[in-house]
Image (cartoon, rainbow, N blue to C red):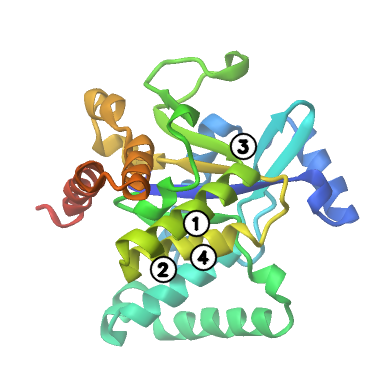
Amino acid sequence: MLPYAAYLRVYEPLTAFTPSERVSWAAYAEATDRPRRASALHAEHGEAVRRLLGVPPAPAPAQESPNAYLRRVEDVLYVCPWQSRLRSWLAFSRFRGTTPARLVERFVPISIAEQTADDFDRFKRRSDSAALRTHIRTSTWHVPTSWFVPFDGNERWLVLDGRRGPGGTVTTRNLIYVTSMAHARRRSARALQIIRRQAGEISVATEVEEVARWLEEFHPHSLVELDYGGIVHLMDDEKLQADQSVAELAAALTGLETGEEELAYAMYQRVILRWRSIQLLESAN
């Protein structure tokens, strides 16, 4: 079973990488033994589970992952590196920062935790800001409302079990949105402007601004993807088919912009209540 997590990914065109990276990723794309899209999440999750079940457990891999998610559009190769080591370091730092020390020991021995933190500190000291930029953001048990902003309802692609995706490939159950970076940035900027002018909710504006700033860090011709990942297993077919969170949030923003406050409130509440009910499953017994 996949973890109940959703993912926001950025795929950069091959030209966005250094010459040596371009050669490496081009060769990777032609490799026959690399993880394919249908099984990539399972492969990524399997690596993490093996590290954590080891004796002693390894919060982060010793080397950066050589894998990536790939997309091809009109013969252009787009790459989203897994960055498993960097993402693990960041996740473990958040875990240590939000968990009492005595509880951290139950998961990872103190010596291993300190070594992991030291390794990350050394990496940060010898790296520039670009090296600390992750192409993938992860959210457990729900999809943050701000993640819906960069997309349009027509960019929704729902796949139920046993269906075939583009190119005839067999795909697993999933719900995905994909858009261009230009569209994602424009929608995020518009949403931020509307929220600041009409709603005045600082927390919502902050979340949208954070996503917008993150998108600005990448190549302007990139692709942006929202992947419901393992969260689709918390929703039956009927709920997945009825989930129009992106379209509903867009309607809420348009309602705010045009002065239709009742419509805006109704659409926003539909999104909030849907995801609140799913997020509560984290603490369900």
Image coords of residue 167 (percent x, y):
63, 16
Category of crowding for the residue at label 4, using alpha-carbon neighbours closer than 10 angstroms: few (below 14), some (14–19), many (at least 20): some
**Quarter of the view holding residue 251:** top left
Local SS, label 1? strand
Image coords of residue 252 (percent x, y):
31, 44
The residue tagged 4 is 88
Q: In the displayed structure, does residue 198 sit left or right of residue 14?
A: left
Category of crowding for the residue at label 2, using alpha-carbon neighbours closer than 10 angstroms: few (below 14), some (14–19), many (at least 20): some
Q: Earlier in the sequence, mark 2 or mark 1?
A: 1
Q: Earlier in the sequence, mark 4 or mark 1?
A: 4
The label nearer to you, 3 versus 2, is 2
Q: Earlier in the sequence, mark 3 or mark 1?
A: 3
The residue tagged 2 is 206
> From mark 4 to mark 2, how far is it between C-alphas?
25 Å
Q: Amino acid at mark 2?
A: Thr
Local SS, label 2? helix
Q: Are marks 2 and 1 in contact (CB under 8 Å)?
A: no
Q: Earlier in the sequence, mark 3 or mark 4?
A: 3
The residue tagged 3 is 35
Category of crowding for the residue at label 3, using alpha-carbon neighbours closer than 10 angstroms: few (below 14), some (14–19), many (at least 20): some
The disc label shown at residue 137, or none: 1
Q: Residue at x 57, y 33 (%)?
A: 37
